[in-house]
Image (tube, grey):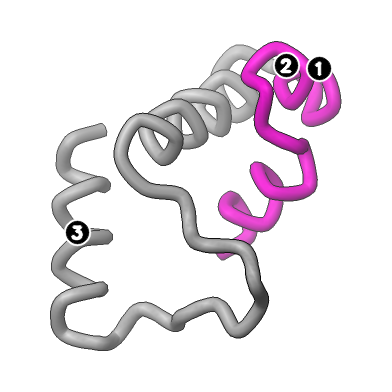
Amino acid sequence: MDDVLIELMAMTADGTRPTRSGPKPALAGAALRKAIMSIWCVCFCGMRWRAIGLLSGIPFGTLYSLFAR
C-alpha cells in the first residue's frame, strides 16, 4: 500500500501522471488510501463494485476508474 502511494507521488512530481481536466480534484491522503484498500477488497475478497462504493463512501465509478487506470 505504501509502495503504491510512494510511486503515485513520484509520478506526480515528475509529471508522468496525467492530470484531471474536470473540476473534481484527484483523491489524496486518507481518501486515496481508502480507495486503494477498497479496490483491494474487490480484487482479492470478491466484493462487488457497488457494494464497496456504498461501504467506503466513495462512488463506485470513481473506484472503478482508479482501478482501470
Residue at 26%, 47% in the rendered image: 4
Q: How many marks?
A: 3
* Residue 58 counted in the magenta span: yes
Question: The residue tagged with tag 3: helix, strand or loop?
Answer: helix
> Which three-letter amino acid code belongs to the residue tagged 2?
Met
Q: Tell me where residue 65 appears, x and y as whole percent.
A: 67, 57
Question: The residue tagged with tag 1: helix, strand or loop?
Answer: helix
Q: Tell me the residue that label 3 is attached to.
A: 7
Mark 3 nearby-residue class (10 Å; few <14, some 14–19, many ≥20): few
**Residue 9 numbered mark, or none:** none
Q: Tell me the residue that label 2 is attached to.
A: 47
Quadrant of image for the N terminus: top left
Residue at 69%, 48% in the rendered image: 62
Mark 1 nearby-residue class (10 Å; few <14, some 14–19, many ≥20): few
Q: Tell me where residue 46 appears, x and y as whole percent.
A: 70, 17
* Residue 48 counted in the magenta span: yes
> Which three-letter amino acid code belongs to the residue tagged 3?
Glu
> Which three-letter amino acid code belongs to the residue tagged 1?
Ala
The vertical placement of 56 against 26, above or below, is above
The vertical placement of 21 against 26, above or below, is below
- Marks 1 and 2 in Cβ contact (< 8 Å): yes
Distance CA(mark 1)–CA(mark 2): 7 Å
**Residue 51 numbered mark, or none:** 1
Q: Which residues are magenta?
A: 47-69
- Marks 3 and 1 in Cβ contact (< 8 Å): no
Question: Which secondary structure type mostly characterizes the magenta part of the structure?
Answer: helix
Distance CA(mark 3)–CA(mark 1): 28 Å
Q: Tell me where residue 37 appears, x and y as whole percent.
A: 45, 25
- On the rendered structure, is 5 left or right of 45? left
1 vs 2, front mark: 1
